[in-house]
Image: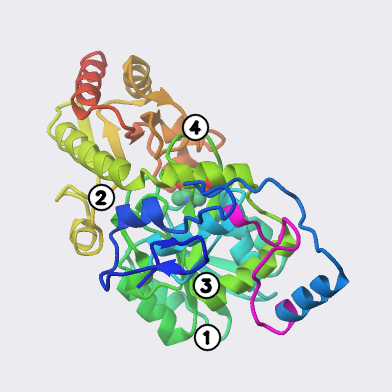
Amino acid sequence: MAALRNLEDGTEYSESAVEPGSSTQAVHGGTQRHKAYHALHTPIVQTATYTFANTQELIDFMQRQTWGEGREREEYGRYGNPTVNAVEKKLAALDHGEDAVIYSSGMNAVTSVLLSILPTGAHVIMTDDCYRRTRQFCMTFLQRFGIETSVVPMGDYEALDNAIIPKKTRFIISESPTNPYLRVADLTRIAELGRKHHVRTLIDSTFATPINQTALDWGIDFVLHSATKYLSGHNDLLAGVIVGSKERIAGLRAARGILGGVSDPQNAFLLDRGIKTLGVRVRHQNQTAQAIAEFLEQHPRIERVWYPGLESHPDHAIANAQMKGFGGVISFEVAGDMDTTIRFIDSLKIPYIAASLGGSESLVEPPAIMSYFDKTREEREAIGIKDTLVRYAVGLEDADDLIRDLDQALARV
Ligand SMILES: Cc1ncc(COP(=O)(O)O)c(C=O)c1O
């Protein structure tokens, strides 16, 4: 079983044969008590480099590292840091992986994993309805290195199978749930396709969190999160993480030492602190979002609601089978036009108008005039972004207050 915590002599505490639950892992996973100060929290080891007492110590370290006997200490901040390592262990435990590597942002995690693994001439498949910058990176930056990307419709597994080019396709990337329509991928089918064709699979699980979904358990190779969202949970930092097998993550960590997208120790400490409350926060957000989705679905001024916890959602059945909760983001279409939608958003009193999700404060955004502002209406509609679409990311407020607020705003449109 995964160790709950490390004792001061370096041994791991694990008396029970039962795998600890996700909230227990969120609190205790990876924690390293400081030998000298008996501190409860993993200390912030604020250093750029590490010293050697003499050249023999340096030679011993280099030998152990070079000949694969593992690292029991650090050499330089871009290669490792104890505070960063502790949060990586916690994240690995939460997502049921062997190891994890954190980055300076979610996008840094996306770009680093692809740059680290893909050779020139490779081919990537991604599902549509995904984070715009991930798609942009694949379609523009990767193309410059001769790497082509095919985009297939989410939920069309035949199209996914057909898009695989033998010996060329190296990666299948999908979000689950997606942004903004909260589509849920059938993880088993994606993992099976990956195995059949020797293609690596990656799920961006940002909207789910490890509380609601552990994609590695369904056979996926890599799980990615923008830790800026639910994992840190307070809208106050940027970070990204990738979880997977020991061997695959070792490769990514070595590449991070070259690409340089590290998270600094202060940031890692804040992330660790945020994760401790992940379980209670996400379960609260699941409940609030479900209540809001049900309220909106019966409201006459709402055209359509997209939330995987609703039976009307196209992926409700697969979400039910795969997820422990449906997350804190709801997308919906206001009955009317762009002006109606703007009046509605401006009448809301609790959520802030802001990009992002997963923090304490509820946030609302009209994708047509935020994430997709630079596109024409025709271009937006071609990718399914309507003028009346609203994305609402619930925070930690009381559900009744948020619903009352939505009700009064809808009464004004
Ligand atoms: C699903 C998803 N993946 C990745 C990212 C990128 O994360 P970051 O903003 O931490 O770079 C985002 C950001 O919104 C996202 O929503």
Return the disc, 1 or 4, that comes first in the chain's sequence. 1
x, y percent for residue 85: 57, 59
Q: Is residue 67 magenta?
A: yes
Q: Specify the segment rendered in magenta.
A: 65-83
Q: Which residue is mark 4?
A: 370
Q: Is residue 393 magenta?
A: no
x, y percent for residue 78: 72, 57
Return the disc, 1 or 2, that comes first in the chain's sequence. 1
Q: Amino acid at mark 4?
A: Met
Q: Amino acid at mark 3?
A: Phe
Single out the mark in the foreground, 4 or 3: 3
Q: Are marks 1 and 2 in contact (CB under 8 Å)?
A: no
Residue drawn at x 36%, y 66% is 215
Circle 1: element type: loop
Q: Which residue is mark 3?
A: 171
Q: Amino acid at mark 2?
A: Phe
Crowding at dot 1, Cα within 10 Å, few <14 / some 14-19 / many 20+, comes out as: few
Compute the Cα span from label 3 to label 2.
26 Å
Circle 3: element type: strand
Q: Which residue is mark 2?
A: 326
How was this image coloured?
rainbow
Q: Is residue 144 visible?
A: no
Crowding at dot 3, Cα within 10 Å, few <14 / some 14-19 / many 20+, comes out as: many
The disc at residue 166 is 1
Q: Are marks 1 and 3 in contact (CB under 8 Å)?
A: no
The residue closer to the viewer here, 214 or 156, is: 214
Return the disc, 4 or 3, that comes first in the chain's sequence. 3
Q: Is residue 47 left or right of residue 321?
A: right
Crowding at dot 4, Cα within 10 Å, few <14 / some 14-19 / many 20+, comes out as: few
Compute the Cα span from label 1 to label 2.
35 Å
